[in-house]
Image: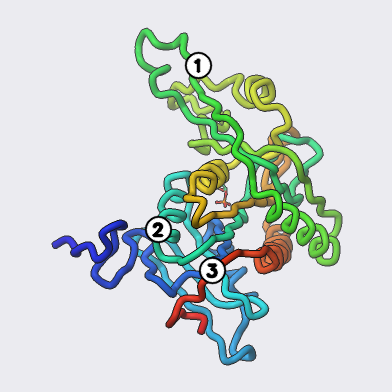
Amino acid sequence: MKNKLTNANFPMDVEGRVYHVGVKRGETANRIITVGDHVRARRIAKLLDGPEVKGRTVFELVSQRGFTTFTGTYQGVPVSIIAIGMGTPMVDFLLREIRACVEGPIAIIRFGSCGSLNALAGCGDMIVPSGAYSITRNYDHFLDGHDTEPAYHFSKVFDADPTLSRLLAASLTATLTANTSGCKVITGGLNATADSFYSTQGRSDPAFRDDNERLVEEILPRERPGTDALEMETAALFHLARCANPKNPVRAAATMMVFANRVTNEFITPEVVDLLEPAAGKAVLEALIKVELEQEHPEKGSVWE
Ligand code: R1P
Protein backbone atom coordinates (compact mmCIF):
# COMPACT_ATOMS: atom_id res chain seq x y z
CA MET A 1 0.00 0.00 0.00
CA LYS A 2 1.32 3.49 -0.87
CA ASN A 3 2.06 5.87 1.99
CA LYS A 4 -0.18 8.89 2.23
CA LEU A 5 1.50 12.18 1.23
CA THR A 6 1.96 14.34 4.31
CA ASN A 7 3.25 17.34 2.36
CA ALA A 8 1.04 18.80 -0.32
CA ASN A 9 4.03 20.23 -2.16
CA PHE A 10 6.50 17.38 -2.09
CA PRO A 11 6.16 13.58 -2.01
CA MET A 12 7.04 12.26 1.46
CA ASP A 13 5.93 9.24 3.48
CA VAL A 14 3.83 9.39 6.64
CA GLU A 15 6.94 10.09 8.76
CA GLY A 16 7.88 13.02 6.52
CA ARG A 17 10.73 11.10 4.86
CA VAL A 18 11.55 11.79 1.22
CA TYR A 19 11.17 8.67 -0.89
CA HIS A 20 14.68 8.01 -2.20
CA VAL A 21 17.28 9.75 -0.02
CA GLY A 22 15.17 8.60 2.92
CA VAL A 23 15.82 11.51 5.32
CA LYS A 24 13.33 13.81 7.05
CA ARG A 25 13.65 17.36 8.38
CA GLY A 26 16.44 17.71 10.94
CA GLU A 27 18.50 14.83 9.52
CA THR A 28 20.43 16.89 6.93
CA ALA A 29 22.32 20.15 7.29
CA ASN A 30 22.37 23.22 5.01
CA ARG A 31 26.00 22.42 4.19
CA ILE A 32 26.46 19.26 2.16
CA ILE A 33 29.29 17.30 0.58
CA THR A 34 28.10 14.86 -2.05
CA VAL A 35 30.22 11.98 -3.32
CA GLY A 36 29.55 8.95 -5.47
CA ASP A 37 31.13 6.26 -3.37
CA HIS A 38 29.77 5.41 0.13
CA VAL A 39 33.26 4.31 1.23
CA ARG A 40 34.52 7.84 0.44
CA ALA A 41 31.57 9.31 2.35
CA ARG A 42 32.40 7.21 5.43
CA ARG A 43 36.05 8.27 5.24
CA ILE A 44 35.04 11.94 5.32
CA ALA A 45 32.44 11.31 8.04
CA LYS A 46 35.29 10.04 10.26
CA LEU A 47 36.58 13.65 10.26
CA LEU A 48 33.37 14.99 11.84
CA ASP A 49 33.28 16.00 15.50
CA GLY A 50 33.11 13.03 17.85
CA PRO A 51 32.05 12.57 21.48
CA GLU A 52 34.91 14.85 22.64
CA VAL A 53 32.85 17.77 21.22
CA LYS A 54 29.69 18.04 23.35
CA GLY A 55 29.27 14.24 23.28
CA ARG A 56 28.50 14.30 19.55
CA THR A 57 27.71 11.18 17.55
CA VAL A 58 27.39 11.14 13.77
CA PHE A 59 23.92 10.35 12.40
CA GLU A 60 23.94 7.71 9.63
CA LEU A 61 21.17 6.54 7.32
CA VAL A 62 21.34 4.15 4.37
CA SER A 63 18.20 4.44 2.26
CA GLN A 64 16.51 1.59 0.43
CA ARG A 65 17.53 3.28 -2.84
CA GLY A 66 21.23 3.33 -1.97
CA PHE A 67 21.77 6.89 -0.70
CA THR A 68 24.02 7.02 2.39
CA THR A 69 23.73 10.10 4.60
CA PHE A 70 26.03 11.11 7.46
CA THR A 71 25.13 14.23 9.45
CA GLY A 72 27.11 15.77 12.28
CA THR A 73 29.26 18.81 12.91
CA TYR A 74 32.73 19.80 11.73
CA GLN A 75 34.42 22.30 14.05
CA GLY A 76 30.97 22.83 15.52
CA VAL A 77 29.24 23.61 12.18
CA PRO A 78 26.44 21.25 11.03
CA VAL A 79 27.31 19.37 7.80
CA SER A 80 26.01 16.36 5.90
CA ILE A 81 27.97 13.99 3.69
CA ILE A 82 25.81 12.12 1.22
CA ALA A 83 26.85 9.31 -1.12
CA ILE A 84 24.54 9.08 -4.11
CA GLY A 85 26.00 6.43 -6.40
CA MET A 86 26.47 7.56 -9.99
CA GLY A 87 24.90 9.68 -12.68
CA THR A 88 22.77 12.78 -13.16
CA PRO A 89 19.39 11.27 -12.13
CA MET A 90 20.85 10.66 -8.66
CA VAL A 91 21.85 14.34 -8.45
CA ASP A 92 18.28 15.29 -9.26
CA PHE A 93 16.91 13.00 -6.51
CA LEU A 94 19.48 14.34 -4.07
CA LEU A 95 19.07 18.05 -4.56
CA ARG A 96 15.28 18.13 -4.86
CA GLU A 97 14.73 15.83 -1.88
CA ILE A 98 17.28 17.57 0.35
CA ARG A 99 15.79 20.93 -0.64
CA ALA A 100 12.43 19.66 0.60
CA CYS A 101 13.96 18.75 3.99
CA VAL A 102 16.15 21.80 4.68
CA GLU A 103 15.04 25.32 5.56
CA GLY A 104 17.02 28.26 4.04
CA PRO A 105 20.00 28.41 1.68
CA ILE A 106 22.09 25.37 0.82
CA ALA A 107 25.82 25.13 0.09
CA ILE A 108 26.80 21.91 -1.65
CA ILE A 109 30.16 20.65 -2.88
CA ARG A 110 30.55 17.60 -5.06
CA PHE A 111 33.75 15.75 -4.20
CA GLY A 112 34.14 13.22 -7.00
CA SER A 113 36.63 11.48 -9.21
CA CYS A 114 37.16 12.07 -12.92
CA GLY A 115 39.11 11.35 -16.03
CA SER A 116 41.42 14.20 -16.97
CA LEU A 117 41.52 15.62 -20.50
CA ASN A 118 44.41 17.93 -19.63
CA ALA A 119 47.87 16.38 -19.97
CA LEU A 120 49.01 18.66 -17.12
CA ALA A 121 46.35 17.38 -14.69
CA GLY A 122 47.86 14.04 -13.75
CA CYS A 123 46.58 11.25 -11.52
CA GLY A 124 46.26 12.42 -7.92
CA ASP A 125 45.79 16.08 -8.90
CA MET A 126 42.57 17.92 -7.98
CA ILE A 127 40.45 19.87 -10.46
CA VAL A 128 38.14 22.72 -9.38
CA PRO A 129 36.13 23.65 -12.50
CA SER A 130 34.68 27.11 -13.05
CA GLY A 131 31.70 25.59 -14.88
CA ALA A 132 30.27 22.39 -16.26
CA TYR A 133 28.28 21.22 -19.28
CA SER A 134 26.61 17.98 -20.21
CA ILE A 135 27.30 15.57 -23.04
CA THR A 136 24.27 13.43 -23.80
CA ARG A 137 23.69 10.69 -26.31
CA ASN A 138 21.27 11.71 -29.04
CA TYR A 139 19.04 8.60 -29.20
CA ASP A 140 17.50 9.75 -32.49
CA HIS A 141 20.85 9.54 -34.32
CA PHE A 142 20.68 5.76 -33.93
CA LEU A 143 17.31 5.41 -35.68
CA ASP A 144 17.30 4.44 -39.36
CA GLY A 145 17.46 7.54 -41.56
CA HIS A 146 18.64 9.87 -38.76
CA ASP A 147 22.40 9.31 -38.77
CA THR A 148 23.07 12.76 -40.25
CA GLU A 149 22.09 14.20 -36.86
CA PRO A 150 24.99 14.48 -34.37
CA ALA A 151 25.29 11.39 -32.18
CA TYR A 152 26.12 13.46 -29.08
CA HIS A 153 24.75 16.75 -27.77
CA PHE A 154 26.76 19.36 -25.85
CA SER A 155 24.84 21.66 -23.48
CA LYS A 156 25.93 25.21 -22.73
CA VAL A 157 28.12 25.85 -19.66
CA PHE A 158 26.62 26.24 -16.16
CA ASP A 159 28.84 28.16 -13.73
CA ALA A 160 30.02 26.98 -10.33
CA ASP A 161 29.42 29.34 -7.40
CA PRO A 162 32.54 31.55 -7.63
CA THR A 163 32.90 32.24 -3.89
CA LEU A 164 32.53 28.61 -2.87
CA SER A 165 34.91 27.55 -5.66
CA ARG A 166 37.54 30.07 -4.53
CA LEU A 167 37.28 28.84 -0.93
CA LEU A 168 37.53 25.26 -2.18
CA ALA A 169 40.61 25.86 -4.33
CA ALA A 170 42.36 27.77 -1.52
CA SER A 171 41.54 25.09 1.04
CA LEU A 172 42.68 22.26 -1.26
CA THR A 173 45.91 24.06 -2.06
CA ALA A 174 46.68 24.65 1.63
CA THR A 175 45.73 21.16 2.84
CA LEU A 176 47.25 19.17 0.02
CA THR A 177 50.52 21.06 0.04
CA ALA A 178 50.85 20.13 3.71
CA ASN A 179 49.66 16.49 3.45
CA THR A 180 50.48 15.03 0.03
CA SER A 181 53.55 15.39 -2.11
CA GLY A 182 53.42 16.97 -5.54
CA CYS A 183 49.62 17.15 -5.84
CA LYS A 184 48.44 20.12 -7.94
CA VAL A 185 45.12 21.98 -7.80
CA ILE A 186 43.94 22.91 -11.29
CA THR A 187 41.40 25.75 -11.46
CA GLY A 188 39.57 27.80 -14.09
CA GLY A 189 38.78 25.06 -16.63
CA LEU A 190 35.55 23.26 -17.49
CA ASN A 191 34.06 19.95 -16.47
CA ALA A 192 32.18 17.72 -18.92
CA THR A 193 29.39 15.58 -17.44
CA ALA A 194 28.63 12.55 -19.55
CA ASP A 195 25.44 10.48 -19.40
CA SER A 196 27.42 7.24 -19.83
CA PHE A 197 30.75 5.98 -18.54
CA TYR A 198 31.11 4.31 -21.94
CA SER A 199 29.67 5.82 -25.13
CA THR A 200 29.52 9.46 -24.04
CA GLN A 201 33.06 9.27 -22.67
CA GLY A 202 34.40 8.01 -25.97
CA ARG A 203 35.19 4.46 -24.85
CA SER A 204 35.01 1.97 -27.66
CA ASP A 205 32.75 -1.06 -27.17
CA PRO A 206 32.35 -3.36 -30.17
CA ALA A 207 29.26 -4.90 -28.53
CA PHE A 208 27.23 -1.75 -29.35
CA ARG A 209 27.01 0.87 -32.07
CA ASP A 210 28.12 4.15 -30.47
CA ASP A 211 29.55 6.29 -33.31
CA ASN A 212 31.88 7.90 -30.76
CA GLU A 213 35.32 7.34 -32.35
CA ARG A 214 36.04 11.09 -32.70
CA LEU A 215 34.09 12.30 -29.67
CA VAL A 216 36.73 12.91 -27.00
CA GLU A 217 39.88 13.53 -29.06
CA GLU A 218 38.34 15.71 -31.77
CA ILE A 219 34.74 16.87 -31.24
CA LEU A 220 34.92 17.76 -27.51
CA PRO A 221 38.02 20.02 -27.75
CA ARG A 222 36.44 21.80 -30.72
CA GLU A 223 33.01 22.24 -29.06
CA ARG A 224 34.21 23.10 -25.54
CA PRO A 225 37.90 24.06 -25.44
CA GLY A 226 39.44 24.30 -21.97
CA THR A 227 37.80 21.14 -20.61
CA ASP A 228 39.89 19.59 -17.83
CA ALA A 229 37.59 16.93 -16.35
CA LEU A 230 35.20 14.26 -17.58
CA GLU A 231 32.76 12.68 -15.10
CA MET A 232 29.05 12.02 -14.63
CA GLU A 233 27.32 14.40 -12.16
CA THR A 234 28.58 17.98 -11.87
CA ALA A 235 26.71 19.70 -14.73
CA ALA A 236 23.40 18.45 -13.31
CA LEU A 237 24.32 19.93 -9.93
CA PHE A 238 25.35 23.32 -11.33
CA HIS A 239 22.32 23.41 -13.62
CA LEU A 240 19.82 22.63 -10.85
CA ALA A 241 21.52 25.06 -8.44
CA ARG A 242 21.01 27.76 -11.07
CA CYS A 243 17.34 26.81 -11.35
CA ALA A 244 16.76 26.98 -7.57
CA ASN A 245 14.20 29.50 -6.35
CA PRO A 246 16.31 32.62 -5.57
CA LYS A 247 14.41 33.04 -2.28
CA ASN A 248 16.01 29.77 -1.21
CA PRO A 249 19.33 29.69 -3.07
CA VAL A 250 21.64 26.73 -3.66
CA ARG A 251 25.37 27.49 -3.92
CA ALA A 252 27.21 24.68 -5.69
CA ALA A 253 30.87 23.96 -6.39
CA ALA A 254 32.85 20.84 -7.24
CA THR A 255 36.23 19.25 -7.08
CA MET A 256 37.39 16.05 -8.72
CA MET A 257 40.34 13.80 -7.99
CA VAL A 258 41.99 12.74 -11.23
CA PHE A 259 41.72 8.93 -11.28
CA ALA A 260 42.71 8.50 -14.96
CA ASN A 261 44.42 10.73 -17.47
CA ARG A 262 42.72 10.22 -20.82
CA VAL A 263 45.59 11.87 -22.72
CA THR A 264 48.50 9.95 -21.21
CA ASN A 265 46.50 6.80 -20.26
CA GLU A 266 47.92 6.91 -16.74
CA PHE A 267 45.80 5.47 -13.83
CA ILE A 268 45.83 6.29 -10.14
CA THR A 269 46.99 3.63 -7.66
CA PRO A 270 44.94 2.59 -4.60
CA GLU A 271 47.79 3.85 -2.38
CA VAL A 272 47.46 7.38 -3.78
CA VAL A 273 43.67 7.28 -3.35
CA ASP A 274 44.11 6.23 0.30
CA LEU A 275 46.33 9.25 0.88
CA LEU A 276 44.41 11.76 -1.23
CA GLU A 277 40.80 11.08 -0.23
CA PRO A 278 41.00 11.93 3.47
CA ALA A 279 43.28 14.92 2.85
CA ALA A 280 41.07 16.36 0.13
CA GLY A 281 37.95 15.47 2.15
CA LYS A 282 39.27 17.58 5.03
CA ALA A 283 39.95 20.47 2.65
CA VAL A 284 36.41 20.23 1.26
CA LEU A 285 34.93 20.28 4.79
CA GLU A 286 36.99 23.35 5.66
CA ALA A 287 35.80 25.24 2.59
CA LEU A 288 32.21 24.22 3.22
CA ILE A 289 32.08 25.55 6.78
CA LYS A 290 33.67 28.87 5.73
CA VAL A 291 31.10 29.94 3.15
CA GLU A 292 28.56 32.45 4.43
CA LEU A 293 24.98 31.31 4.23
CA GLU A 294 22.41 34.03 4.73
CA GLN A 295 19.42 33.13 6.94
CA GLU A 296 20.58 29.67 8.00
CA HIS A 297 17.74 28.13 10.03
CA PRO A 298 18.86 25.54 12.56
CA GLU A 299 16.07 22.98 12.63
CA LYS A 300 14.52 22.31 16.05
CA GLY A 301 15.18 18.73 17.12
CA SER A 302 18.01 18.29 14.55
CA VAL A 303 20.29 15.28 14.81
CA TRP A 304 23.31 17.54 15.49
CA GLU A 305 21.76 19.28 18.51
C1 R1P B 1 32.34 6.38 -12.63
O1 R1P B 1 33.25 5.40 -12.29
C2 R1P B 1 31.95 7.26 -11.46
O2 R1P B 1 33.10 7.89 -10.88
C3 R1P B 1 33.02 9.32 -10.99
C4 R1P B 1 31.99 9.52 -12.11
O3 R1P B 1 31.41 10.79 -12.08
C5 R1P B 1 31.02 8.38 -11.91
O4 R1P B 1 30.08 8.64 -10.90
O5 R1P B 1 32.67 10.01 -9.84
P1 R1P B 1 32.55 9.42 -8.34
O6 R1P B 1 33.89 8.87 -7.99
O7 R1P B 1 32.18 10.55 -7.45
O8 R1P B 1 31.45 8.39 -8.37
Crowding near pointer 3: few (<14 within 10 Å), some, many (20+)? Answer: many
Q: Distance between the residues labelled 1 and 2?
A: 34 Å
Which residue carries the number 2 mark? 97
- Label 3 and label 2: CA atoms lie apart by 14 Å
- For badge 1, the amino acid type reads Pro
Taking 200 as reference, is 264 left or right? right
Residue 45 in the image, given as x and y percentages of width and height: 58, 72
Answer with left or right where residue 178 lies relative to residue 141. Answer: right
The picture quadrant where one finds residue 293 is: bottom right
The label on residue 184 is none
Quadrant holding the N terminus: bottom left
What kind of element bears circle 1?
loop
* C-beta proximity under 8 Å, tags 3 and 1: no
Q: Name the residue under label 3.
A: 80
**Mark 1 lies on residue:** 150
Q: Which amino acid type is marked by label 3?
A: Ser
